Image (spheres, helix red, strand yellow):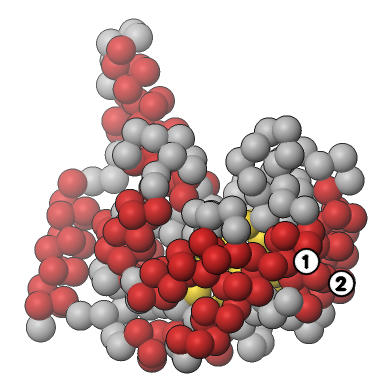
Amino acid sequence: MPTDPAVRRAAFRRLHEGGCFVMPNPWDVGSARALQHLGFPALATTSAGMAFSQGLPDGGVPRSGVLEHVRAIAGAVEVPVSADFESGFAVDAAGVAESVRLCVAAGVAGLSIEDSTGDRTAPLFELDVAVERLRAAREVIDASGTGVVLTARAECHLVGHPDPLRESIRRLEAYAAAGADCLYAPGLRTPQEVAAVVKAVAPRPVNVLAGAPGFSVAQLRDQGVRRISVGAALARAAWGAFLRAAEEIAGPGTFQALAEAAPFPRLNAFFTEDVRRREK
């Protein structure tokens, strides 16, 4: 059975106090339990990975569905779970506050709020609006007394901002001042960009997205990064293997790619043992 949410929340906060840890992103209960088995100290949901598993694009799952998913993941493992809570499923601060209240009640140890609008013509909230939204999330968490870790995301790199690093730093500094516990600018590509973000918001912890080859845990740790996530990359890796095998079957009609599949006995034995362990 999952440990008490308060215990997991305290453990999650301690992870942010020193060192560097990897927080991979499962997309369903099975992948969450497998990642826990591998020894990762915390997990985070992935909005894209979850959406793809439901036949929807990233951002296509309504708040109710996201909350159900977050609740299922948090209830399936003993380690802390942080929610990829997109843009808070609201435009105004009051709406963000209500969404955050519901997310905290779902049993998470952390959650992230983005500053993206979903509008291609104006992809980022104006900074004062983004700060107001983040402060609303901070107030709800503080009032809850849960100690849930609030991560603020600057989406500049992902929405094609013309000067993404400079604007990310400007926004992350403002978010730190507004009470964010952890800062995150997905899309950093070079050690120099990572170093600039870490320096700008120090001593607040920084999350870096490792969604493709390029960084190593050791390299990011040495640069002062506190937390590493992979976003939808594990889900995309699974989809990549699936599509390669399916396209081979649909095309030449051969089955060579299936040789790379995880052996049935290994998977079945793992989940059998996992069920037994949880039933004790």
Density class for disc 1 (Cα within 10 Å; few <14, some 14-19, many ≥20) is many
Density class for disc 2 (Cα within 10 Å; few <14, some 14-19, many ≥20) is few
Q: Is residue 87 above or below residue 223?
A: above
Q: Visible in this render: residue 39?
A: no
Secondary structure at numbered mark 1: helix
Q: Give, as a three-letter code, the residue at label 2.
A: Ala
Q: Which residue is mark 1?
A: 172
Q: Residue at x 60, y 78 (%)?
A: 138
Q: Give, as a three-letter code, the residue at label 1.
A: Leu
Secondary structure at numbered mark 2: helix
Q: Residue at x 34, y 41 (%)?
A: 53
Quadrant holding the N terminus: bottom left
Marks 2 and 1 in Cβ contact (< 8 Å): yes
Q: Which residue is mark 2?
A: 200
Residue 254: % across, % down: 29, 15
Query: Of callouts 2 and 1, which one flags the residue occurring earlier in the amino acid sequence?
Result: 1
Q: Visible in this render: residue 104?
A: yes
Q: Is residue 25 above or below residue 3?
A: above
Quadrant holding the C terminus: bottom left
Q: Is residue 223 above or below residue 215?
A: below
Q: Residue at x 10, y 77 (%)?
A: 279
**Which dot marks residue 198?**
none
Residue 124: % across, % down: 72, 47
For the residues labelled 2 and 1, the Cα–Cα distance comes to 8 Å
Q: Nearer the viewer, residue 57 or 37?
A: 57
Q: Quadrant of residue 199?
A: bottom right
Judged left or right of residue 62, residue 115 is right
Q: Nearer the viewer, residue 125 or 226?
A: 125
Judged left or right of residue 207, residue 222 is right
Number of numbered labels in the structure image: 2
